[in-house]
Image (cartoon, rainbow, N blue to C red):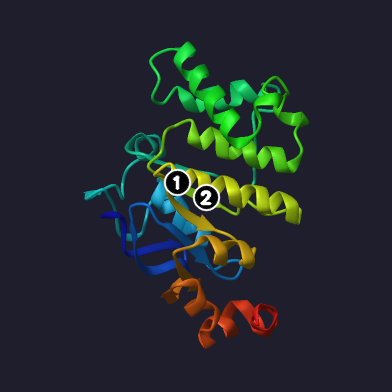
Amino acid sequence: MKLLEIDRLTKDFGGLRAVDRLDLTIEAGMIFGLIGPNGAGKSTAFNCIAGLYSATSGRVVYKGDEITSLKPYDVCRRGIARTFQLVKPFPTKSVLKNVTVGGFLRSKNRDEAEEKALEVLEFVGLIDKKDVLGKSLTIADRKRLELARSLATDPTLLLLDEVMAGLRPAEVEQVITIIRKINERGITIFLIEHIMQAIMSLSDLIVVIHYGKKIAEGKPEEIASNEQVIKAYLGEEYVLAGT
């Protein structure tokens, strides 16, 4: 079943075209990767899908309904949650309170929201830090907190924007495991990531964009051997490392 359809999505900032007539379709249950050089338009595309930016033209269709012009809170109510590259927890609030905020989207009262938050913190491995202030967390725990806040909204589609950036190899492996478990729960994943071993191992399909345009789409092994992608992004070093 088609969950998300992007049809000729375009976003201009004055004379700069950040996303250029992007087309893609994500089926329910997939882990779908989006890669490209810095400045390629990946996060801008996410921001248009999530309602943070208004698209210049094109359409975003979710579960058969167009959501192109919806505000972020309405997009979230429809079942799309996202993380951000720069993780900014509420610094003077506890981890539990940070996540409880997300739980209020579906919950009728504080007790329900907090119960959801505790469940999610257990899932991402932060339950033992529920009373720690947001400002006291390590970068790895802040990344988990960002995941937890998004999961507390009970999404059907989760947009992950470089959720592994800045992590050590062992921490990357832990997040990969969490992402797989999220997907096993029936949540579709749309993932931006620069750690190639991670995105190649996780993704069912990958789209590559360069200067806002889609230059390739395919399975990870097809993307890794695509000459245009190697020139624009991966580089010969990645190809040699994978052989």
> Circle 1: is it few (<14), some (14-19), or many (20+) Cα within 10 Å?
few
Q: Which residue is mark 1?
A: 184
Residue 237 left/right relative to 42: right
The answer to which image quadrant residue 242 occupies is bottom right
Q: Quadrant of the N terminus?
A: bottom left
The amino acid pointed to by label 2 is Arg
Q: Residue at x 68, y 84 (%)?
A: 240
Callout count: 2
Q: Residue at x 71, y 26 (%)?
A: 129
Residue 180 is labelled as 2
| Residue nearer the viewer, 45 or 147 | 147
Q: Quadrant of the C terminus?
A: bottom right
> Circle 2: is it few (<14), some (14-19), or many (20+) Cα within 10 Å?
some
Q: Residue at x 54, y 44 (%)?
A: 83
| Residue 34 percent location from the top left of the image | 49, 64
| Residue 180 percent location from the top left of the image | 52, 50
Query: In the image as oriented, which residue stretches furthest toward the bottom?
Result: 227
